[in-house]
Image (spheres, grey):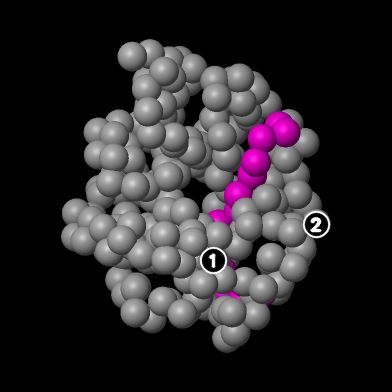
């Protein structure tokens, strides 16, 4: 059985019952709580806030990652590490010195992640792969939930899978990830799956049933 990291995208959760949502996802076997932070500049939207992050961090002992969709992410990295982030993702094109920012994250004992937009080529970030623990491939354009999966990103995913052993990183995908894509991409070598409304939230089944099925524990 291929090991999978199931990462609920918390911007898709029911914020009227956030404490219940976190507890149910935690108990269901979620591995990493995924928090999207947006500044309305790098992407045309605003995501979750500091208070949301703090609340979820206090509500679970599971790992939490933060996806910084912001300009000048180096200004925010240590803030979120101090608040309890275990993995920090940022977009290298928004940072003047991305290698330094990756080093800053790792120096604090946390996992450093690069986020790659659909239009970002591997060649532009290849040297940074030596410093990354995780690579988050966006399979939709970042900023909004409920978009359609972009099939042309599959070629980029396959190229990164072929590179991950040499550079020693794990691959995570984010954006319109359905049950079928979890199964297909996991077999290819993808480790982590950020899940929103395509596979996890707003379904008739319980979180426990969905996550057990995704991990193959009901087979």
Task: Name the residue tied to disc 2.
Answer: 82
User: In the image, residue 39 lies at what x, y percent?
Assistant: 57, 65
Please state the extent of the stretch shown in magenta in the rendering.
Answer: 60-74
**Cα distance between the residues tagged 2 and 1:** 20 Å
Residue lying farthest to the front in this orientation:
166
Q: In the rendered view, does 98 fall on the left or right side of 115? A: right
Q: Which quadrant holds the N terminus?
A: top left
Which quarter of the figure has residue 151? bottom left
Residue 95 percent location from the top left of the image: 56, 80
How busy is the neighbourhood of tag 2: few (under 14 within 10 Å), some, or many (20 plus)? few
Query: Which sits in the foreground, 42 or 213?
Result: 213
Q: Residue at x 42, y 77 (%)?
A: 125
**Which residue sits at x=57%, y=75%?**
71
For the question of whether residue 142 can be seen, the reply is no
> Measured from the top left, where is residue 146 in percent x and y?
34, 44
User: Residue 202 lies in what quarter of the image?
Assistant: top left
- Relative image position of residue 158 (x, y in whole percent): 26, 58
Question: In the image, is residue 11 above or below residue 217?
Answer: below
Q: In terms of image quadrants, where is residue 219?
A: top left
């Amino acid at each position: 059985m291929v090991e999978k990291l199931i990462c609920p995208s918390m911007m898709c959760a029911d914020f009227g019952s956030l404490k219940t949502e976190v507890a149910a996802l935690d108990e269901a076997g979620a591995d990493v709580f995924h928090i999207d932070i947006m500044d309305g500049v790098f992407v045309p939207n605003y995501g979750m806030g500091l208070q949301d992050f703090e609340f979820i961090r206090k509500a679970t002992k599971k790992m939490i990652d933060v996806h910084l969709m912001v300009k000048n992410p180096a200004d925010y990295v240590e803030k979120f590490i101090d608040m309890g982030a275990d993995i920090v993702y940022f977009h290298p094109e928004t940072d003047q010195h991305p290698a330094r920012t990756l080093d800053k994250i790792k120096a604090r004992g946390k996992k450093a992640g690069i986020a790659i937009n659909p239009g970002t080529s591997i060649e532009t970030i290849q040297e940074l792969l030596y410093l990354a623990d995780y690579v988050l491939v966006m399979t939709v354009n970042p900023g909004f939930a409920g978009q359609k999966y972009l099939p042309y990103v599959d070629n980029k995913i396959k190229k990164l899978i072929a590179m991950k052993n040499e550079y020693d990183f794990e691959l995570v995908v984010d954006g319109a990830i359905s049950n079928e894509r979890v199964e297909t991409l996991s077999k290819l070598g993808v480790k982590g799956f950020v899940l929103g409304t395509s596979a996890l939230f707003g379904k008739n089944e319980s979180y426990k049933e969905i996550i057990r099925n995704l991990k193959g524990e009901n087979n």
